[in-house]
Image: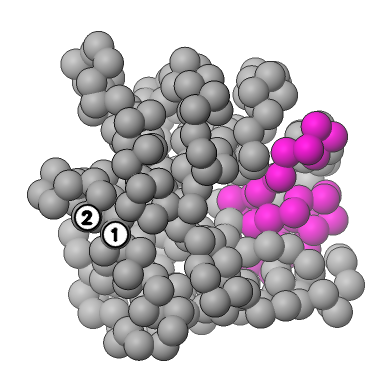
Amino acid sequence: MASKTKRTVGPAHLRLGVNIDHVATIRNARGGRHPDPLRAAHLAVEAGADGITAHLREDRRHISDADIARLKGELTRPLNLEMAATDEMLAIALRHVPHACCLVPEKREEKTTEGGLDVVRGENHLRHYVEALRGVGIRVSLFIEPDARAIEASARIGAQVVELHTGAYCERALADDAAGLARELSRLESGARSAATAGLEVHAGHGLTFNTVGAVARIADIVELNIGHFLIGEAIFSGLGPAIARMRVLMDEAREGNASRPGRASP
């Protein structure tokens, strides 16, 4: 494990990465070009996003290869490419050289990413991809559970960033399970602290809503949140720009210590 002398508290400004996958999901439901994920990315940046995330899946169920090329060519903010650790995805990443790549587990039958990478058992396999991506200057993130062993393994194989899976925390909020919510929040706090101590930059995401973002945003070791599905869903009711702007305000208020504890999560 990396030295435990590197821990630094996260900056006052908590970055927001907006995942635009499900703009492409809606487009693909009917075919054609509308709605355009690139347009959504530009609107997200205007509304306060610090970066854009897109997951190129093996089955291309939402984001396409053409989307990645357009995003890389036209974005004015960093592009974070989520990808499985496969040779096909590695070749695509090396061709486009996004700002960052986040390696995620991927199963064809899942509706969405169901949990973090098993970095401990997959350490030897993942090391090859981490080294190849870092070799061309791409920042490498691993999507993991807030687990000490996964964090230690991430540091050993050379990842610069870990993104902590917030799905279990958000599920406990939806279930109105106060004890479970506190337990999962404690895991996130402990995981973020351990990752920062190991010299890793700490991100978090998956399932966050207006009602659940505050407690996670208050964790000082976390420097970036990645949020997508909820914001695209809210855009139906309020517009994408206003939805992102509200999330940005809630994150900022929480970081400044002005937000109250989250209540029942939005559906």
Say what amino acid the circle numbered 1 marks: Ala
Judging from the image, the colouring scheme is: one colour
Pick the residue in front: 106 or 94.
94
Q: Which residue is mark 2?
A: 242
Q: Let me know if residue 128 appears in the view.
A: no
- What is the residue that sits farthest to the left in this orientation? 237
User: Dot 1: what SS?
Assistant: helix
How crowded pointer 2 is (Cα within 10 Å; few <14, some 14-19, many 20+) is rated as: some
Q: Which mark is residue 132?
A: none
User: Dot 2: what SS?
Assistant: helix
| Marks 1,2: beta carbons within 8 A | yes
Pick the residue in front: 164 or 168.
164
Give the left or right position of residue 91, taking residue 48 as reference.
right
The N terminus is located in which quarter? Answer: bottom right
Residue drawn at (55%, 38%), measured in percent from left and top? 79
Q: Dividing the picture into quarters, in which one does residue 97 lie?
A: top right
Q: Which mark is residue 245?
A: 1
Give the left or right position of residue 166, taking residue 3 as reference.
left
Q: Is residue 136 above or below residue 69?
A: below
Residue drawn at (41%, 88%), measured in percent from left and top? 257
Q: Let me know if residue 38 appears in the view.
A: yes
Numbered circles on residues, count: 2
Magenta region, residue range: 134-162
Distance between mark 1 and mark 2 Cα atoms: 5 Å
Say what amino acid the circle numbered 2 marks: Pro
Residue drawn at (38%, 29%), measured in percent from left and top? 38
